[in-house]
Amino acid sequence: MTDRANFLAARRSRQTCPDTYLPEKLYKRTNGRCLQNGIAEEQNAKDPIAMSVGQNDSRHAARFAPALLLLALSFVINYIDRGNISVAAPLLKTELHLSASQLGILFAAFFSTYTAMQFVVGWVVDRFDANRVLAAGFLLWSMATAATGMVRGFALLLAMRFTLGIGESVAMPSGSKILACNLPEHRRGFASGAMMAALRCGNAIGTLGAGLLMARFGWRPVFITIGLASLLWLPAWAKWMPRGNRELKTALGSKPGLPTILRQRSFWGTSAGHFSANYLFYFMITWLPSYLVFERHLSMASMSAVAGLYYSVDSGSAIAAGWLQDVSIRHGYSPTLVRKSAMAVGFSLAAIAIVGCAASSHSYLPWLLTAGLGCGMTGPGLFTFPQTLAGADAVGRWYGWQNGFANFAGILGPVLTGFVVERTGNFLGAFVITAALCVAGVVAWVFVVGRVEQVRWKTRHDAEILSANAQA
C-alpha cells in the first residue's frame, strides 16, 4: 500500500464509540466500551473524564431546553393554522357561497403543496441552516394565515391554502434536523415525543379554541389575529435558537445522495411504518368526532369532551414514551431494542384497542383511550429512527422523503374511510382497516427496518481508499 493509502486506512479504522462518537482517548478510558452517549456506566462512575462528559451533557440539555420549548410551540401553531379552515368551513360556505366541491378543493389544496414540498425541503434543510429554514417557513405560513382572513373570493383563498402548505412543509424536516444536530441518542426520545405531543395539542386547540372564537367574533378576525400574533415567535427563536450546532459526526461517511438513501431497506421500512402511523393519526383526527356523534350518539358537548380526552391521552403518551426510551438507553439497553419495542407495543395496543372499540356495544371508552395510548407511543419513533439511521448530515433528506410518502395516508385515509362508511352504514369496516395497517406498522418497524444505528454511507472518502489500495 502507498503512504496515502496507509494514512487513509488508519484514519478510517481509528477507534471511536459508534453511539456517541467519542474520541479515541476517552473511548479507551472506558475500557473500550461506549459511554451511552456521554453517560458512564456504573463501573466508570468515578472516572473523572466520564463524570465530566455526563455533566457537560446535562448542561447542554439544559441550554437546549428553551429551543426545544420554542420548537414545540411552533408545532402547536403549525397545526392550529392548518386546521382552522376546517373549523371555519360552515362560515366560509355561507359567506362566500362556496359549494361542497369547492370546500373539498380547499381542504386538499394544503396537502397537495405540503406533500409535494416534503420531497424538496429535506434537501434544503441539509444544505442550509435548519434554524433559518424553519424561521423562513414560519414567517410564510403565518402571513398566509393572516392573509386568509383578508382575501375575498375562492381563487385567492385557494392561493393562500397553497402558500400555507409550502410554508408549513419545512416544520417537520427542520425539527428533526435540529434535534439530530444538537441532541445525542439518549436525549432524542423525550424531545421527539414533545414534538409529536405538540402537534396533537395544536389540533385539539385549533378545533376547540378557534371554534369558540369564530362563533363569537367571526372567522376573519380569528385568522388575522392568530396569523399576526404568531409572528411574536420569530424574535424569541432568533434569541434562543441553538447556536453552533453540535453535529455528532462519525467516521461512517456523510452527506449521501438521495439515490443512496433510497437504496436502504431501512428507509422503506421507516416510510411504510410512518404511513401506518399517519393513517391511524389522520383517521382519529378526521373521523373520530363523526364516529362519536353518529355511531355512539353523543351530543356535541359530550363528543368534544371525549375527543379532547382521547387527544390528551395521545399527547401524554407520546411524551412519556419518549422519556422512558431515553431512560432505558441511558441504563444500557440498545437503541435497536428500545426503539423497536416501543413501536411494536404501541401499534399492537392500537390495533387491539381499535377492534375492541368498534366491536364493543357500550364500554367503548376504555378501548378508545387505550388506542390513544398506543397511538402516542408510536410518535417519538417517527423522528428518532431517521435521526439515528441517517445521521445529522442526511436526516433532512431521509425524513423529508419519509414524511412525503407517509403523508399520502392523509389523502387516502379520510377518503377511504368515508367510502367504507357510506357503503356499509357503520364504522366497523373502517376500524378494521385501520387496525390492519397498525399490524403492518409492527412488521415495518420491527422486521423491515434494520439495526437502529447510523448507516455506513459510502462516500468519496471510501472511493479514495479503494483507489489507493488498487494502486498499491
Image (cartoon, rainbow, N blue to C red):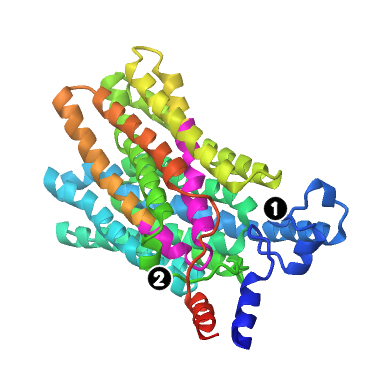
Residue type of the residue flagged with mark 1: Gln
Residue 238 visible to the viewer: yes
Q: Which residues are magenta?
A: 373-401
**Element under label 2?**
loop
* 465 or 310, nearer to the observer: 465
Q: Residue at x 37, y 39 (%)?
A: 281
Q: Residues within 10 Å of mark 1 (few under 14, many from 20)?
A: many
Q: Quadrant of the N terminus?
A: bottom right
* Quadrant where the C terminus is found in the figure: bottom right
Residue 36, disc: 1
Spatial separation of the CA atoms under disc 2 and disc 1: 29 Å
Query: Taking 361 as reference, is 472 above or below it?
Result: below
Q: Quadrant of residue 133?
A: bottom left
Q: Residue at x 62, y 46 (%)?
A: 334
Q: Residue 272 versus residue 420: which sits nearer the camera?
A: 272
Horizontal side of residue 51 vs 116, given as left or right: right
